[in-house]
Amino acid sequence: NKTSAAIRQGADDKHALVEMIAMSRSLTDLDLSNCRLGANLGKALAAAIRANSSLEALKLDNNAFGEAGEGLMAALRIRQEGSAHFKYTCDNILFDPSTQCNRQYDASNPPGHYLLDLSLPADQTLAKLLVK
């Protein structure tokens, strides 16, 4: 039972998703990468991970959990220690709420955090500018 979620509609949809994760007994794989999950969802997601016993794979890449990130990471580590089958990825997670990802390139000040979707031509162009 594989599920891929791209929840961008609104806070109510995101909270409903977290409730579904907590209650589901058949959900095994979930990809929440690039879903703009913030600190409020990070706290709720940590509780949902603790409540869900069926989840085996979770991707949380490219989300800004802010101050809730540490609690979420602790819940993930505890879950992984308790289950040899549970795997997760958290690439490019932002823990500092003041850090922001850029989608605009400023030639005079190129360093920074960039959140790119390399399937988009504009982001491919930006990536080429950044690696020059």
Image (cartoon, rainbow, N blue to C red):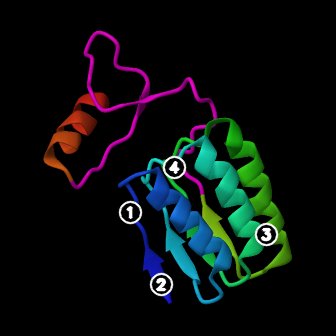
Residue 59 visible somewhere in the drawing: no
In whole angstroms, how far apart are the C-alphas of marks 1 and 4? Answer: 10 Å
In whole angstroms, how far apart are the C-alphas of marks 3 and 2? Answer: 19 Å
| Residue placed under numbered mark 4 in the picture | 37
Which mark's residue is nearer the viewer, 2 or 1? 1
Question: Is 65 part of what is drawn in magenta?
Answer: no
Residue 63 visible somewhere in the drawing: yes
Which mark's residue is nearer the viewer, 1 or 3? 1
In whole angstroms, how far apart are the C-alphas of marks 1 and 3? Answer: 23 Å
Magenta stretch? 90-119
Using the image as rendered, state which of residue 84 and residue 23 is in the foreground.
Answer: 23
Q: Name the residue type under label 1.
A: Ala
- Going by the image, does 130 lie left or right of 113? left
Residue 79 marker: 3
In x, y percent, where is residue 77?
79, 61
- Residue at (51%, 47%) from the top-left corner? 63
Residue pushed farthest left?
121
Q: Quadrant of residue 8?
A: bottom left
Q: Are marks 3 and 2 in contact (CB under 8 Å)?
A: no
| Residue placed under numbered mark 2 in the picture | 2
Residue pushed farthest front?
12
User: Can you say whether 123 is above or below 106 in the image?
Assistant: below
Secondary element at image label 4: loop
| Residue placed under numbered mark 1 in the picture | 6
Quadrant including the C terminus: top left
Using the image as rendered, state which of residue 109 and residue 29 is in the foreground.
Answer: 29
In whole angstroms, how far apart are the C-alphas of marks 3 and 4? Answer: 20 Å
